[in-house]
Image (cartoon, rainbow, N blue to C red):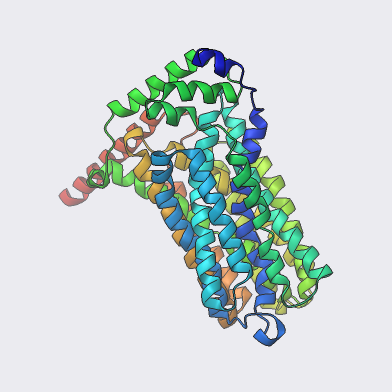
Amino acid sequence: MSQADATSRVRALPLGAVALIATLGSLLFGYDTGVISGALPFMAHPVDQGGLGLSDVAEGVITAALPIGAALGSVFGGQLSDKFGRRRMLVWLAFIFFIGAVGAATSLNMGLMAFFRVVLGIAVGGASTTVPVYLAEVSPAEKRGSIVAIDQVMIVTGQLLAYTNNALIAHLYGESSSWRWMLLLASIPAIGLWIGMRVMPESPRWFVAQNREDQARHSLERVGAEHIEAQLDDIRSTIDKVDSQESMGFGALRLPWVLRIVVIGMGLSVIQQITGVNAIMYYAPRILESTGIGTNAALTATIANGVISVLAALLGLILVRKLPRKKLLALGQGLIVFSLVGIGAISLATDGQGATWLVLVLMLVFLTGQQGAVSPVTWVMISEVFPLRVRGLGVGLSVLVQWLANALITFSFPILLGLVGLGPVCMVFAGLNVLALILAARHLPETSGRTLEEIEQIMAASKRRSRVRAADTHVN
């Protein structure tokens, strides 16, 4: 019996099921970034009461440990998946997610907790680079956009799941050691990812890149692909095109147009983080507690953040296709500035007391602007702004900057909160976002409806204009 006859008898997996299993990695990404918001208030309790006795600095260290690990995971995750395969990489990541969740849940001190949060971060960073690539490479062209979009929806769904579990555990268990159960629950989807990915097909594109076309054909059969030989031809031609254009390494940064595009990509990453979104996501219960409500009530109210994040992310999938990128980014940042100024003003005027619901509503407006506009624009533009030969370099540096900015903000936020209070901190973030709005309006190219070549031409023209202005200034 021929290889083709054998593969023809393979029962095809529904593409939706393949996406669901793979995006358990994205669900874990969201859960592990969101669960800390509910765990921190209980971890701050004294050790003899079941907590870890965390100070403001210790809270910042533990929270920032995950994005630091994610920076490492995002740097090496893509290279490892290129070498060993997307499916195998996700199996490894599932194991790392499991070890990190169990280790964090059983930690006896801050040092161990920080270490296992770094471990979790490595898995999060690896998933952030591997899952979208896997989804894109197993999906047919006509379904690729909607399948890959599931990744971002599953991230915010994971955060909603974390907020809901935090509130349920706090109400049902209600002891200082509740945080251990919150963290341990992340091990369940990790097991599901490990089992599920062991029976999923490998990326056919990866097989073709490894000159294993019979196995690539088998993978396409597994996902019910049609016109398999035509798809294999397309994959071969794409890989040949990439190979024919030699990738430009760090030396390319000496070219002005390359440096400009890379700086813009990194700037987009900073804009996404400078909004303060992860301060809201990680420390929402603490912010709400500062308005005078109890821990359990704050955890319950935080569920609304997760619900709005999911709904706004779904809305963002529509808006990013219909509105120009810069206009949508400005709209999102406008809502964010409005929210931050509002929360800051309320906190300064009332010291936060008695304004819980107003602060919560403004947080929801903030998340609508972030998840419905700023985040989708950031990820879409990072994926399209770089020409082919510098795409790996540009995306890698942009994602790295994003995680490092995340770590800096999440580390400093509780410390600043303890030193100066919520009002001044929100006003500082509002000012930074106004500055980001101005810089984006002046320097960010509009990429909607433009090819990568057209974007490169815009950059080159901008560089020439800069030289002309510099020459005119020198003459004058």
* Residue 283 in the image: above or below residue 474: below
Quadrant of res 146: top right
Does residue 327 show up?
yes
Q: From this viewpoint, which residue is outermost toward the right? A: 172
Viewer-nearest residue: 359 or 83: 83
Position of 26 relative to 338 (above/below): above
The residue drawn where x is 16% and y is 49% is 475
Considering every residue shown, the one lying at the far left of the view is 475
Residue 432 in view in this figure: no
Horizontal relation, residue 56 to residue 385: left or right: right
Using residue 338 as the reference point, say whether residue 93 is left or right of it.
left
* Quarter of the view holding residue 220: top right
Residue 193 relative to residue 297: left or right: left
Along the line of sight, the residue nearer the viewer: 317 or 69: 69
Residue 154 sits above or below residue 61 on the image: above
Q: In the figure, 210 relative to 352: above or below?
A: above
State the image coordinates of residue 334 (x, y, percent, origin top left): 60, 53
Q: Position of residue 153 (x, y in %)?
A: 65, 43
Residue at 74% in and 52% down: 307
Q: Residue furthest front?
A: 1
Q: How many marks?
A: 0
Residue 160 placement (x, y as % from top left): 71, 54
Residue 404 in the image: x percent, y percent? Answer: 44, 61
Quadrant position of residue 410: bottom right
